Image (cartoon, coloured by chain):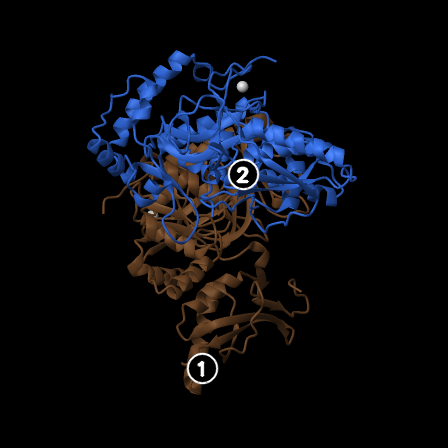
Chain colours: A brown, B blue
Amino acid sequence: MAIEFWQEEFETLGKKDLQKLQVDRLNKTIESACRSPFYGNLYSKKNIKPGAIKAISQIAELPFTTKQDLRENFPYGFLSLPKKDIIRLHSSSGTTGNPTVIFHNRHDLKSWANLMARSLFCAGIRDTDVFQNICGYGLFTGGLGFQYGIETLGALSIPAGAGNSLRQIKLMRDYGTTAAHAIPSYLGRLYEVFEAEGLDPKRDTQLKTLVIGAEPHTDAQRKRIEEMYGVRAFNSFGLSEMNGPGVAFECTHQNGLHIWEDSYVVEIIDPETLQPVPDGEYGELVMTTLDREAMPLIRYRTRDITRIIPGECECGRTHRRIDRITGRSDDMFIIKGCNVFPMQIEGVLMKIPEVGSDYMIHLETMNGADEMVVEVEVKSDWFQGDIKRLNSLSNTITRQIRDEVLAKPIVKLVEAGSIPKSEGKAIRVTDNRKNGLLN
Amino acid sequence: MAIEFWQEEFETLGKKDLQKLQVDRLNKTIESACRSPFYGNLYSKKNIKPGAIKAISQIAELPFTTKQDLRENFPYGFLSLPKKDIIRLHSSSGTTGNPTVIFHNRHDLKSWANLMARSLFCAGIRDTDVFQNICGYGLFTGGLGFQYGIETLGALSIPAGAGNSLRQIKLMRDYGTTAAHAIPSYLGRLYEVFEAEGLDPKRDTQLKTLVIGAEPHTDAQRKRIEEMYGVRAFNSFGLSEMNGPGVAFECTHQNGLHIWEDSYVVEIIDPETLQPVPDGEYGELVMTTLDREAMPLIRYRTRDITRIIPGECECGRTHRRIDRITGRSDDMFIIKGCNVFPMQIEGVLMKIPEVGSDYMIHLETMNGADEMVVEVEVKSDWFQGDIKRLNSLSNTITRQIRDEVLAKPIVKLVEAGSIPKSEGKAIRVTDNRKNGLLN
Ligand SMILES: [Zn+2]
Ligand SMILES: [Zn+2]
């Protein structure tokens, strides 16, 4: 396969050139940010001046920006341009309290649409594709974000919106949809409707690519979706504070998401110490916009937990890859001095074939020491009362969790169905420690 | 007030220059249409060739296109370009039968966005406005149609979507919304929510302009909306086959909707004889696209009933004005040789202060002759058993209906509440004639 790029001149920039571009754009961004009430005030207090950044590592000298800052300076405290230059806003939902709002001028929307087109192209989608955007429109960024990207790419967009599975299926079949965007859990429900209608997406549609995002999911879920639909499924990452979708995207090698470093500075920090973590280690993603005029954000703490995947991608793109999001920094707990994210444990468990669908993490104080007890269901068709096999499985899980999070767990295997199902979002961690933080 | 235009060079074209432009564009449109399977086949059979049109009146020599044609040639029979050039489709809803689908290439979307911006500008909306688009997005053309238009104009767009009144109100107040688009019936419901919250849109919002469309409504409804919100409300007209919104729009003089004649050829025909009706008379709107590349439609029978408003508009725009849509040609009936649309009768009744909220039209055969019996509720606080006043009202109604539709009705006044309310769409006409067509 020929290597192809949407914007080769940006996507394959060497490290030095990329960093030079980042430094130039960061200085411009600081200059523009200083025109906003929030940064103008903050940077003048801290004597931070445009042009101060000579090497991209110096970004660590700038203060962080948090969601709390956004809320407290609602609605116009981060605006760097006169209101009349703004042509769109996206805001979080809810009818009480201050929402999070992001403003865009014409340049920002064009630049966002371009990053979306680059992302879709990177996943192998072309102007010959028929792309069905199965997601809510309006203030939610997935709708308009993908819409503008598909049109910029030149594929045929079907602005299908969310829900109404029968209609989604009819659209797919009427227009020969080859690619679609949806949240992973919806694709499971949609498949059930296909089945109920006596249809098989593999036989009865022309789908070859799915883009999944906006909802944390494991690689096992991705594989299941790929099998159900007979497609390749690509991870999309974005957050509304950084525009929405189009921040990071998997290429056809499906080994992590290229994060567009000409448009964002990417840092991974320890959410406790706020210091950078080495490549390969999990931490909180911190992002700085480099190409946004209306509302630059500098060192924004996303709360999303991921890691930089070390090494280069075979596709030839030089922008680094992040791993799928493994949770929120608010979910992190510390045990035996190690920062642990529940999704790391889940990641280990889901790769072990004997493990069933549920697990719980209990943090306990035992004989004065804090311990992490991991309760794991085993599949009912596997467990036949063989104690030797149980011990062997328990040892495997213990070792693999320790390798992943560095803290050794106490593993308890339990029968399938013995962990109570929770309504809504699953609760995966209980903290019963004497000085536990999660109580 | 200074006269201002979005595109003065097009909006103020003299009649001759406008017709010359139309002839040029119509010939190009025929040329492009001939590349579609439907028109290619039809025009070759009828020996219609690009360049055949020398005067715009010759358009009457071309065959009509109907919704039935669109359905029978679903999905690609009207496509004039290779599929890979298409970047968006909009299609009607429904999960059974063939929907109506319209395809757009990049040029078409740009041209549509420009017409929308021109329309908003014409109603006095500027880049300093904050415009909340209260309508469904996705395949419904009101969402993306207005979105692209607002952004092209340069106003701040709030892609609010439909429903969730509390949130709509919060958005209006958080961002100082000055203009909004919604269907008239929703604005009534929204006002009730304002009231329930102890809020008054006149005092508690910065609204000054509302755009209403997509739903037939009377001028009385418009006036009520203007009073409730303390705004000016402008009519918007569009239909998905002609892109969606942005086809015709009221200017600040609010006396009819300028229909953009550089982009559409406009004809009004008698739906029975298919012959043109004189300016000022009601008939079916027939439209031809002049600036659409992917899917030109020539002499498309819209089924919408309106009329050309004679005379020139004070705003200086030379594009003719159509009246608000007064119904669908399918609703038309013929009585005593006159074509009558129920909305004409409603228009007369709603202007008479003594008339209540309901009426019915009964077509009857009496002594061998067909008669139109109009049953009219009178307001309960007005009727006090005074037969002289009743007779006088009845005579007024009879005379005004006859003046409007040319056929003399038999008017029956009834008490308020005596006409049964129908669920859903009101049924306004019953046909009990011996050879009635509406049975
Ligand atoms: Zn790659
Ligand atoms: Zn005018």
User: For residue B254, which quarter of the picture?
Assistant: top right
| Label 1 packing within 10 angstroms: few (<14), some (14-19), many (20+) | few
User: For residue A80, which quarter of the picture?
Assistant: top right
Residue found 40% across the figure and 68% down from its top: A351
Residue found 36% across the figure and 44% down from its top: A120
Q: Is mark 1 within 8 Å of ligand 1?
A: no
Numbered tag placed on residue B266 in the rendering? none
Q: Is residue A395 above or below residue A28?
A: below
Q: CA distance from mark 2 to mark 1?
A: 93 Å
- Residue B164 shows in this picture: yes
- The residue under label 2 is which amino acid type? Glu
Q: Element under label 1? A: helix
Q: Pick out the residue farthest to the front.
A: B367
| Label 2 packing within 10 angstroms: few (<14), some (14-19), many (20+) | many
- Comparing A33 with B224, the one in front is B224
- The residue under label 1 is which amino acid type? Asn
- Residue A262 shows in this picture: no
Residue under label 1, please give it.
A391
Q: Where is residue B332 shown, x and y percent of the image?
A: 48, 37
Query: Which chain letter goes with mark 2?
Result: B
Q: Is residue A373 left or right of residue A119?
A: right
Q: Where is residue A110 shown, x and y percent of the image?
A: 44, 33
Q: Quadrant of the C terminus of chain A?
A: bottom right
Task: Judge depth for marks 2 and 1 and give the one in front.
Answer: 2
- Comparing B263 with B112, the one in front is B263
Residue under label 2, please give it.
B371
Residue found 45% across the figure and 49% down from its top: A237
Query: Which chain letter goes with mark 1?
Result: A
Q: Where is residue B71 shown, x and y percent of the image?
A: 34, 44
